[in-house]
Image (cartoon, rainbow, N blue to C red):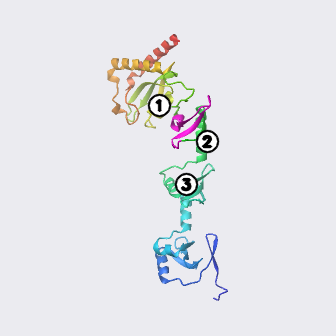
Amino acid sequence: MNMLDTPMTMTINDITFPIHTGTIKPDWIAEAAAKGYDIVARVVDRLHLALRCHKCGGLNKVKRFTLMTAQPLCSHCMMREWTADAQAAGLEFLQRDATNRHYGVYRADCGHQVTRQFGFVKRAASGEVKIRCETCQAAFEMEEARERDWTLLGPDPDGDPSYRHYRHDACGHVQRMARGNVKSGRHACGKCSLYWSAAPSKIYAMCFTLASGRELVKLGYSNDPESRLHYQLKRDPEMPCSILRMVAVPTGQDAVRLEKRLHATLRRSHPECTVDPAAYRTQIRVKSEIYDASLTEIILHELDRIEADLTVAA
């Protein structure tokens, strides 16, 4: 082959590089073979080599120093791995992040683009974590706040990831609140909300069925019994439970007074129905005020009486 037949350039990963003339030493060839590559040529300058991967046949531009001192990574094999991990995680791999080599750009099922670490996507592919679309999550949190009559303004001004910045639709007051409290309704406006003691409340009766099959009843008070049940009391999400009865009470202070009086009556009249917290602590997040279900009808009758008394007093 004469000089006119010798290629002067080589294309690697869609980039054309000049071929550098010079000897390819036997120890380089042996090192490359031991690490899964063939040396095809010297490229760019005396410091770089074109390596062909034994596994996929792809070409890679690698520094000679890297070949001799470390294990070169095949960009083609890595691309296949990133693509496979993305598919297993429910994503479509689009490209590497231009600003950080540890990140990739993906398209989620919703159609939005997300940027994640390759390692995080691999964990998602194995089911260890879930990938959440920031765009969809922001829309979800905005709707979540709107349902509670607040407007989500943005992240927490103090930088706490559990908090957000909100504006109260009723009065325009702006404050930071835990997102979990907004979601569950356990929050109040710092400008126009009543203190719990003056705000309307409810006395409730709830029933629970433990994993053992034992049925329990709880008597308590809250301004939002549904939130109290699902976000505070229910430790086991699979546990059957429901609200049996709610009685509206003018103020939280009245609710405390009536509830405490009823508990005292129940404990005095039916001490055998008080349940040891050890029986339910793994499923219900409370330390007292739980009774055997045999007391249910009596508790419901007492709530009927309280409601009747409140109606007459009104």
Nearest the camera: 107 or 102? 102
Residue 48's place in the image compared with 259, above or below, is below
- Where residue 30 appears, x then y in whole percent? 47, 80
* Amino acid type, callout 2: Ala
Q: Distance between the residues labelled 2 and 1?
A: 26 Å
Residue 198 is a magenta residue: no
* Amino acid type, callout 1: Leu
Residue 90's place in the image compared with 240, above or below, is below
- Where residue 211 appears, x then y in whole percent? 39, 36
Q: Residue at x 38, y 23 (%)?
A: 294
- The mark that comes first in sequence, 3 or 1, is 3
Q: Residue at x 64, y 78 (%)?
A: 9
Nearest the camera: 278 or 310? 310
Nearer the camera: disc 3 or disc 1: 3
Residue 167 is a magenta residue: yes
Q: Give the side of residue 214 with respect to residue 49, left or right.
A: left
Q: Distance between the residues labelled 3 and 1?
A: 36 Å
Q: What stretch is highlighted in magenta?
A: 158-183
Q: Which residue is drawn at 55% across and 56% down?
A: 86
Q: In which quarter of the image is the N terminus?
A: bottom right
Q: Do the residues labelled 2 and 3 touch (CB within 8 Å)?
A: no
Query: Which mark is on residue 229?
Result: 1
Q: Is mark 3 on a helix, strand or loop?
A: strand
* Residue underneath mark 2: 139
* Amino acid type, callout 3: Arg
Q: Give the side of residue 310 with respect to residue 284, left or right.
A: right
Q: Distance between the residues labelled 2 and 3?
A: 20 Å
* Residue underneath mark 3: 116
